[in-house]
Amino acid sequence: MTVAGRKIVESEDEVRYEFGLDRQFDRVLTIDKHTWHVSAEDGQFDSAAGAIASKVKRSWQERGEFPPGVVFSS
């Protein structure tokens, strides 16, 4: 499984990523910057959404900023 995400919007309060399997960016993930609450726009927080959220958080912890994109492969 390959899941890719790319940042589409970042504000003071949240960051949003388009993501999907095999680079089909057909879903949106929203991360609250203050609470780290993560939600998928379609209401399905599945393994693909979790993988992107984990990659984004790990990158943020390492670099102190939200990455422009992430990829998860298993």
Image (cartoon, grey):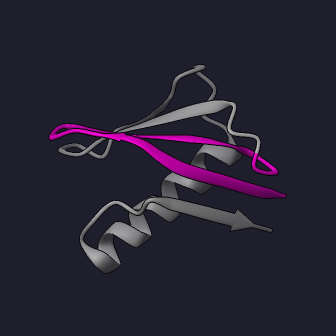
Could you say which is closer to the camera, residue 66 or residue 8? Answer: 8
Q: Is residue 20 magenta?
A: yes
Q: Main secondary structure of the magenta part?
A: strand
Question: Residue lying farthest bottom?
Answer: 62
Please state the horizontal and vertical placement of residue 22, each as a whole percent of the image.
82, 51
Q: Residue at x 34, y 39 (%)?
A: 37
Residue ID at (55%, 32%): 28
Q: Residue at x 63, y 26 (%)?
A: 44
Question: Residue at coordinates 63% horizontally, 31% vertically from top-left?
Answer: 27
Residue 61 in the image: state x and y as whole percent: 31, 72
Residue 11 horizontal side relative to residue 2, left or right: left
Q: Which residues are magenta?
A: 1-23
In the image, residue 19 lies at what x, y percent? 63, 43
In the image, residue 5 above or below residue 63: above
38 horizontally vs 19: left or right = left
Residue 57 lies in quadrant = bottom left
61 relative to 10, above or below: below
Q: Is residue 22 left or right of residue 5?
A: right
